[in-house]
Amino acid sequence: MEASAKLSRKLTRNEFAAMAGGVLVGIGVFLNWYETNAGNRAANVNGMKGAFSAWDVHPILRWLLLAAAVAPFILAYIIVRGHQLSWARGEMTAVTAIAAFGLIVYNGVIGRPGEPSSEISLQPGWWVALLGTLLMLGGAALRSSEVERTRKPPGVI
């Protein structure tokens, strides 16, 4: 009981929001992202019809998104353990969330898989993963903004 009280004192709601976002990204990878139009016989994703998850369609992206989903938990571990970093806590998690957000948006809006791409609709898994990255970004950005940065004199890098 004492360990959980100690944990809750070090972690703020920002870290918990980021971790919830990581869970959503992880779950979103396995939910359906795309579905072919049943009324169009030519609509397919990789030659198949039906609904597909990111795990089914994206062999590299799935691993990148799962790695990004772990980032808020690494941040929480760093905070609980009190590790010293050369950058503000939460910055790398925010950068990871931004990258994951960009990959999800690109693969859902611009480079949607399937032929013709206009006949492939987005499903709830894509939206869940997108929401997860926004939660990760919000929690990590708020955490990194809590750190006061020392100012350097002009001309010093």
Image (tube, grey):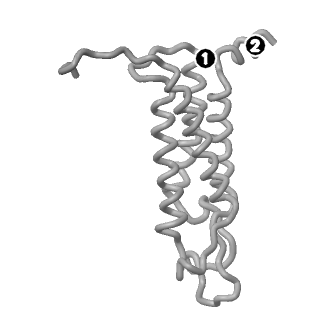
Q: Residue furthest top?
A: 2
Q: Amino acid at mark 1?
A: Val
Which residue was labeled with disc 1?
A: 80
User: Which of the two discs, 2 and 1, labels the residue nearer the N terminus?
Assistant: 2
What secondary structure is found at the residue carrying circle 2? helix
Residue 5's disc is 2
The residue that appears at 54% across and 13% down in the rendered structure is 82
Q: Position of residue 111 (x, y in %)?
A: 47, 68
Say which quadrant the C terminus sits in: top left
Q: Residue furthest left?
A: 155
Q: Is residue 52 left or right of residue 57?
A: right
Mark 2 neighbour class, 10 Å CA radius: few under 14, some 14 to 19, many 20 or more? few
The residue that appears at 39% across and 19% down in the rendered structure is 86
Mark 1 neighbour class, 10 Å CA radius: few under 14, some 14 to 19, many 20 or more? some
The residue that appears at 47% across and 53% down in the rendered structure is 102
The residue that appears at 65% across and 20% down in the rendered structure is 11
Q: Position of residue 128 (x, y in %)?
A: 67, 53
What secondary structure is found at the residue carrying circle 1? helix
Q: Is residue 138 above or below residue 112?
A: above
Q: Position of residue 124 (x, y in %)?
A: 70, 61
Q: Amino acid at mark 2?
A: Ala
Residue 1 image-quadrant placement: top right
Instruction: Report, in whole angstroms, how far the alpha carbon at label 2 lies from the one at label 1.
Output: 12 Å
Q: Is residue 8 above or below residue 128?
A: above
